[in-house]
Image (cartoon, rainbow, N blue to C red):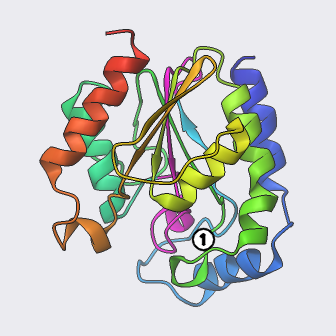
Amino acid sequence: MSSGKLWELREEVLSCNLCPRLRAYSSWVAKEGKRFKEEYWGKPVPGFGDAEAKLAIVGLAPAAHGGNRTGRPFTGDETGRWVIGGLYQLGLSNLKEGKFRGDGLALRGVFLTNTVLCAPPQNRVRREEVANCSRYLRETLRSLPKLRVVLTLGSVAFNAVAEVLGIDSKFAHGTLIHAGELILMSSYHPSPLNTRTGRLSWNQWIEILRHAWKLASGG
């Protein structure tokens, strides 16, 4: 597989209408629920990163005023500052924060995506929406030829990737499972709900991110 395959997948994602509730909400936020004085993306948000990635990070879904606004996962919101900031600290991102599409962000060895590719109301996705998007998750992982580690953020992402990989396991922070040639890891989601309450500290986040990259890079 190659960057060409990822581009084809991106085009397929952008034309997806499998989840009317999510498409309607994403579009509504883009038109009526703006917090920022700029044009919102308001469409499915494809994955982003290095086509030669060894590490994939899978979150829950684009934030209404984050990825749904900027059109790129983990860009323009507090969760994104943790994800991109952590990668920057490890030398895997050229920027400390992703602010908008076209800001020059480049990742080394890492690919970012979400379990569900449209913003959900109240950040809550339905089982059938996860099932609908699982085809894109599966193809994303297949389209990364050098992939070695998948780091999932939160239980929904963990369960979705585990199902795609044929793994029967329960979510716990720090879980590490070998699945053929891939390693599945899990972390609490670095959302404000977890980071502001102390459930996930910056040091914990960097520790698991560093461990994931060490395994992915063969260290």
Q: Is residue 197 left or right of residue 123?
A: left
Which quarter of the rendering shows the N terminus? Answer: top right
Residue furthest to the top: 218
Q: Which residues are magenta?
A: 50-73
Residue 11 in percent (x, y) is at: 80, 44
What secondary structure prevails in the magenta region? loop
Q: Nearer the viewer, residue 187 or 63?
A: 187
Which quarter of the rendering shows the C terminus? Answer: top left
What is the tally of numbered marks visible in this picture? 1
Residue furthest to the bottom: 32
Can residue 45 be seen here?
yes
Q: Nearer the viewer, residue 51 or 155?
A: 155
The reply to whether the magenta stretch includes residue 55 is: yes
Which residue is rendered at x = 69% and y = 60% of the image?
A: 44
Q: Is residue 20 left or right of residue 202?
A: right
State whether residue 129 is above or below residue 1. Answer: below
Mark 1 nearby-residue class (10 Å; few <14, some 14–19, many ≥20): many
State whether residue 213 is above or below residue 196. Answer: above
Residue 126 in percent (x, y) is at: 69, 75
Can residue 71 be seen here?
no
Provide the secondary structure element on which disc 1 rests.
loop
Q: Is residue 39 left or right of residue 180?
A: left
Which residue is rendered at x = 71% and y = 17% of the image?
A: 2
| Quadrant in the picture for residue 105 | top left
Residue 7 in percent (x, y) is at: 74, 33
The residue identified by callout 1 is: 119
Q: Which amino acid, by three-letter code, is at mark 1?
A: Ala
Which residue is rendered at x = 71% and y = 62% of the image?
A: 130
Which residue is rendered at x = 52% and y = 76% of the image?
A: 123
Residue 198 in percent (x, y) is at: 16, 67
The reply to whether the magenta stretch includes residue 65 is: yes
